[in-house]
Image (cartoon, rainbow, N blue to C red):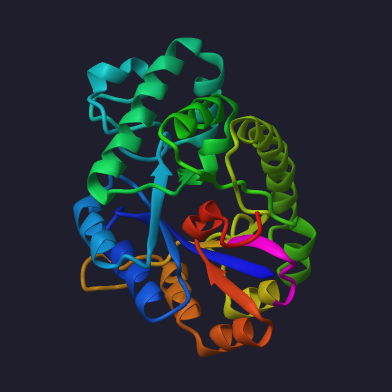
Amino acid sequence: MKALIVNGDDFGHSAEVNAGILRAHREGILTSASLMVAGAARDEAARAARENPALDVGLHVVVCRGQSVLAPDELGGAVDAQGRFPNNPVIAGMRWFFDRRLRDRLAAEIRAQIETHLKMVGYLNHIDGHLNFHVHPTIASILVELASEYRVPCLRLPREPVAATLRLARDNASRKLVEAVIFRTLSRRTRRLMRARGLKSNDRLFGLHQSGHMSEDYVLGVIDRLREGVTELYFHPALDIGGTPPPAGAQIEVEILTSTRVRDALSARGVKLTTFAELARGAIPS
């Protein structure tokens, strides 16, 4: 079976992101979303999650370029005085790896994000990370332990077949190759930790290397190349709803996700749209 999870990241970040994800779900192929529980529009997103039970809403863990749930005085040097994590992912990654004093504070913050999600949404089937920081060595070790403790069955593994992506889109090839080496290495380690705890994940993924530069032709090419098993394809959709216009690429992603050509391609190739909830229940191959 070829099964595809179509996820929208950054749910709760803004009203524009919420609107894009909801349209892509209600009118398109989006099956899943990942909630930023300290995002500016988190309450609206949580209400929408409860009103749209077919949308499988997981947790988008934030430890970089975002806001903390816990107060700054509880997190010490992990955030600034306004509770904001570092914006630079390289600086954040180095800090989380080398400053061992921050590990317990990060663990407390991630626990708080999980508990906030459960209070707001009522369930939690999958976790991923903003900028895929959830596979950072320090964060992954914390997250796998907490996922097991809270019985969260699935985590994203950002292992994208970079050769397939480069055949479809040759732009930024050097950056994509570097990303591939980094995230395959981190995903390999995270997968070992997950297996020891009995956690499940997607078999492969698309959306990492082409993030922000999606096109309908690229997505159709991905659909042509889907293999048996579970693939996750993730997006960052958003709509212009009269406030601050989101990036053009985010608006294009809504068009892709509601495209008749994309839906017809999935049907023609016998691809089953699914969720991490179904993967957790054993309804599709793991």
x, y percentage for residue 133?
Answer: 52, 38
Q: Position of residue 10 (x, y in %)?
A: 39, 54
The C terminus sits in image quarter: bottom right
Residue at 54%, 28% (x, y): give it. 93
Residue at 31% over, 30% down: 112
Q: Which residues are magenta?
A: 224-232
Q: Residue at x 68, y 46 (%)?
A: 179
Q: Is residue 19 above or below residue 262?
A: above
Q: Is residue 47 above or below residue 109?
A: below
| Image-based side of 140 in relation to 80, left or right | right
- Magenta highlight on residue 124: no
Give coordinates of residue 250: x percent, y percent.
43, 67
Q: Position of residue 256 (x, y in %)?
A: 50, 78
Answer above or below: position of 150 versus 202.
above
Left or right: where does residue 229 sit relative to residue 74? right
Q: Is residue 124 left or right of residue 283?
A: left
Q: Quadrant of the N terminus?
A: bottom right
Is residue 24 in sight in this rendering? yes
Q: Quadrant of residue 224?
A: bottom right
Q: Could you tell me which residue is drawn at 64 percent across and 30 percent down?
A: 196
